[in-house]
Image (cartoon, rainbow, N blue to C red):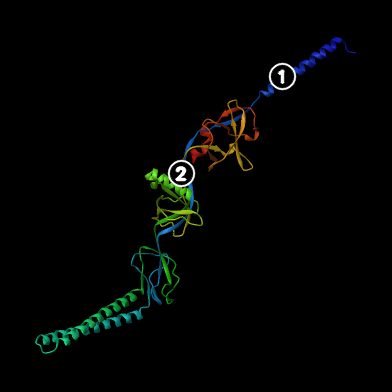
Amino acid sequence: MLSVLSYVVLFVTLLNLVACSSGNSKNQKKVLVQVPIVELQPMSISLPKTYVADIQAVQFVEVRAKVEGFVDRIFVDEGQFVKKGQNLFQLTSNEYNEMVNSANARLFQARAEAQAAQLEVDRLKVLVDKNIIANSEYQLALSKKAVAESVISEAESMLKNARTGLSYTTIKAPFDGIVDRIPYKTGSLVTAGDLLTNITDISEIFAYYKVTENEYLKYMRDKIENDTLDDQEVSLILSDGVYYEYTGKFETMEADFERGTGSIAFRVRFPNPDQLIKHGSTGKVEMTESIEDIYLIPQKSTFEIQDFNYVYIVDKDNVVKIRSFKPLQRFGLFYIADGFEAGDKIIYEGIQQIKDGMEIMPELTPEIEVYDTLVKS
């Protein structure tokens, strides 16, 4: 059996164990997790905006036959650069040559008849002045002369039309440009209206892009406040994702909104000295939009629950509180948001180990580290 002293020693030992256990428990509660945080400050950024563009040549014309005939000669080849007025096609012209010759002969005859009528008028005038014949014969001669002169006008008109028809058998380039595909070859029969080729001038190109009505209203209000808004340079991203080396200038817009889409098209002109871009190419136009007093929230500082975005806010007592927010849009590795206040602190990294109401030991992350990706870009 144990003595009384033994029971006392055992009791004291148990008390010490309980005390130590209680003390260790208190010390463990005081051990806080060290978590990186970031302090939010309002920022002003230039946000790139891209739009799908429809790219067209500054001039694009369909070259069509105006008269019927066989293709006699083709003076150019597909893809060839031509100058304004240069011959492109020659259609058979025998029929039109005959029409010109016939019109010339008719005009020669009309002039001869008019000359004979004039001589008759002059002869009768002398006789009338001598009272040899009646004045009515003279007036009749004048009428015949007038008819002969009208025949001359008619013959001249016929000759002009014949020459115009003959000129249509030679098709010339309407401006400096590049010849497109030639569907009709030598010997082919073409009728009036048939497409012979296209001529494109791609020394410059137009890029058309569509904006919504809200974007249009914002643009017009900004333009009223800032007259130099149209001087903003516009970039072009080609279909392979490479930025075009030349920037463009906004020129004009369409007059009406499209009924189906509610959008309106803007036009930007780009230089194309190397003729890299062809008519009908695809790409995107990109411009920058300045946004002020917004907050950039790192995406790794956020989490989603049922399509809602959240961050952890750290209060003045270093206690974590969950906070929802609505991103305006993405910007690289960040969300653009408003509704925060300058000086708000959020958990930067390690959100997986954080719980709502948890007390932490915050470690402020320098801004240069948080926004390093923006600096590099």
Q: Which mark is residue 363?
A: none
In this rendering, the answer to whether 257 lies above or below 36 is below
How far from the left and from the top, in percent, is residue 275?
41, 57
Quarter of the image containing the N terminus?
top right
Q: Which mark is residue 289?
A: 2
Dividing the picture into quadrants, the one containing residue 11 is top right
Under mark 2, the amino acid is Glu
Figure label count:
2
Question: Which residue corresponds to the image point at 45% horizontal and 48% vertical from the top-left?
Answer: 217
Tell me the distance, in whole angstroms, between the alpha carbons under discs 1 and 2: 60 Å
Please name whichever residue, 274 or 308, is drawn nearer the observer in this view of the structure. 308
Indicate the position of residue 100 as horizontal and vertical percent values.
Answer: 30, 80
Residue 212 in the image, given as x and y percentages of width and height: 48, 51
Along the viewing direction, whichever of 368 and 113 lies nearer the viewer:
113
Q: Is residue 112 left or right of residue 250?
A: left
Binning the other alpha carbons within 10 Å of mark 2 as few (below 14), some (14 to 19) or many (20 upward) gives few
Whether 193 is drawn above or below 328: the answer is below
Q: Secondary structure at mark 1?
A: helix
Q: Circle 1: is it few (<14), some (14-19), or many (20+) Cα within 10 Å? A: few
Q: Amino acid at mark 1?
A: Gly
- Assign a secondary structure to mark 2: strand
Task: Identify the residue at image location x=30%, y=83%.
Answer: 102
Closer to the chain start, of discs 1 and 2, is 1
Pick the residue in front: 263 or 307. Answer: 263
Q: Are marks 1 and 2 in contact (CB under 8 Å)?
A: no
- Please identify the quarter of the rendering in which residue 333 is found: top right
Residue 104 percent coordinates (x, y): 27, 81
**Residue 324 vs residue 239: left or right?**
right
- Which of the numbered marks, if any, corresponds to residue 23? 1
